[in-house]
């Protein structure tokens, strides 16, 4: 047994004897490890035990093992790492600036399973043969997704999408080059005016970050209800109630799906509702809520603004055979006011590609759109469209001509 393994064994025994909780007693655990390292060094001098090559590094690695997430903890602590995933114990990947790289980290099957168990401990969720998938939040807000055999071929597949706070407000997105100042000013005014906004894009395009930034533009007096599969949104307002879905129990009962949460949110006196991601039939309940005069925002996976609108016209059909496109299409046209589409560029940057408005009209079950901002020669520029509800902008104290200028031919 190596010196590091002996030290870790000593620390774990001390934690058991002192009845400490590594997840809660951080200060006590750090002090215990410091004392254990000093005691081990002294014992190595007196008894001839194998010395620690670097006591400070040994203490850090033991802390990562007993109170953190072991070999993955350095990647969780690294602010440049956006996502971590394990395809098999010997193939651990990370993403930096939108690009993936294979790490030198090697794990065992048991280590992977132990790490997942430790990560799930604080969430109250589980993964087993009856529930081979799990989504959960880590204490720092990162999102964990795990799939186990026999859904996967052989190894546990683990994804950790870190909550990297790169932007809290629309101005931060301007600084990062995600959008122009003119677009940010307009979107801020649209949120304050109560327009319904759909944020679209692919995986890792920055949809949740943009939704958070849009949420920060909500007037401070409003009550916001957020609905998510797993907690990710962090709206910086004082009156926010957050809800997430729940898995079924071992008996198959107690599941709380997204659709139920959207309905429950309407009973909580919301001024505004935010849905982390629209995937299935909950889109119908969201559209009905938005159509009733409740302002809201949501994200959806789509490759363009127009594809996002098409998706919102088809997802509600999953709610039942009695839901028809003749009802859904005009409801989408009348409920959604703006669509913002983001994309992850080849260089790893995230940029708004277009902002389109829905004037509220349809023709042959196709929703009409108007371009407000589009990418031209790499720049986000003003197009020739105007948003709906100019009266709402006026009531909120905004002048659309000042915000958008004259239409561009």
Image (cartoon, rainbow, N blue to C red):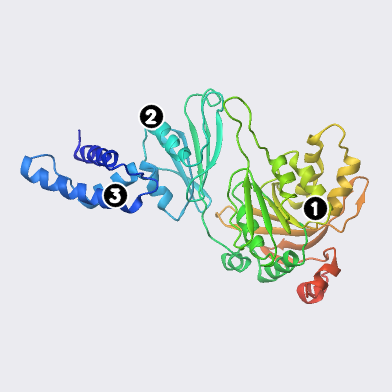
Tell me where residue 54 appears, x and y as whole percent: 20, 50
Of all residues shown, which one is farthest toward the right?
364
Which residue matches tag 3?
A: 60
Mark 2 secondary-structure assignment: helix
Which residue matches tag 2?
A: 110
- Which of label 1 and label 2 is nearer to you? 1
Badge 3 or badge 1: first in the primary sequence = 3
**How many other residues sit within 10 Å of disc 2, few (<14), some (14-19) or many (≥20)?**
few
**How many other residues sit within 10 Å of disc 1, few (<14), some (14-19) or many (≥20)?**
many
Badge 1 or badge 2: first in the primary sequence = 2
Residue sitting at x 33%, y 42%:
66
Tell me where residue 335 appears, x and y as whole percent: 83, 53
Tell me where residue 376 appears, x and y as whole percent: 71, 63
Residue sitting at x 55%, y 35%:
134
Which residue matches tag 1?
A: 290
Mark 3 secondary-structure assignment: helix
Question: In which quarter of the view is residue 255 placed?
Answer: top right
Question: In which quarter of the view is residue 6 placed?
Answer: top left
Question: In which quarter of the view is residue 214 placed?
Answer: bottom right
Tell me where residue 105 appears, x and y as whole percent: 37, 40
242 to the left or right of 295: left
């Amino acid at each position: 047994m190596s010196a590091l393994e002996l030290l870790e064994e000593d620390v774990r025994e001390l934690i058991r004897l002192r009845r400490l909780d590594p997840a809660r007693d951080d200060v006590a655990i750090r002090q215990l490890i410091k004392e254990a390292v000093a005691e081990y060094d002294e014992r190595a001098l007196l008894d001839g035990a194998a010395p620690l090559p670097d006591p400070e590094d040994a203490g850090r690695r033991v802390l990562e093992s007993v109170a953190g997430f072991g070999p993955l903890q350095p990647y969780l602590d690294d602010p440049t790492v956006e996502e971590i995933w394990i395809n098999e114990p010997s193939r651990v990947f990370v993403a930096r600036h939108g690009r993936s790289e294979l790490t030198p980290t090697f794990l065992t099957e048991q280590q992977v399973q132990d790490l997942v168990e430790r990560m799930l401990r604080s969430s109250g969720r589980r993964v087993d043969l009856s529930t081979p998938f799990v989504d959960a939040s880590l204490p720092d807000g990162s999102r964990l997704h795990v799939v186990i055999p026999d859904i996967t071929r052989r190894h546990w597949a683990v994804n950790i999408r870190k909550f990297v706070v790169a932007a809290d407000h629309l101005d931060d997105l301007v600084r990062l080059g995600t959008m122009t100042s003119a677009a940010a000013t307009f979107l801020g005014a649209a949120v304050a005016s109560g327009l319904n906004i759909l944020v679209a894009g692919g995986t890792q395009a920055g949809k949740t970050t943009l939704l958070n930034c849009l949420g920060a533009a909500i007037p401070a007096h409003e009550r916001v209800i957020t609905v998510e599969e797993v907690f990710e949104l962090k709206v910086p307002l004082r009156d926010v109630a957050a809800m997430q879905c729940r898995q079924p129990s071992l008996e198959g009962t107690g599941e709380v799906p997204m659709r139920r949460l959207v309905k429950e949110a309407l009973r909580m006196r919301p001024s505004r509702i935010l849905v982390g991601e629209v995937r299935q039939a909950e889109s119908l309940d969201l559209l009905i809520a938005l159509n009733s005069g409740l302002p809201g925002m949501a994200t959806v996976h789509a490759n363009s603004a127009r594809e996002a609108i098409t998706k919102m016209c088809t997802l509600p059909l999953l709610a039942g055979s009695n839901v028809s496109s003749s009802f859904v299409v005009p409801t989408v046209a009348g409920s959604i006011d703006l669509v913002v589409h983001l994309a992850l560029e080849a260089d790893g940057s995230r940029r708004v590609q277009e902002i389109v408005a829905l004037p509220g009209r349809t023709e042959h079950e196709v929703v009409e759109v108007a371009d407000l901002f589009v990418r031209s020669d790499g720049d986000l520029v003003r197009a020739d469209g105007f948003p709906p509800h100019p009266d709402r902008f006026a009531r909120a104290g905004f002048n659309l001509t000042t915000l958008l200028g004259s239409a561009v031919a």
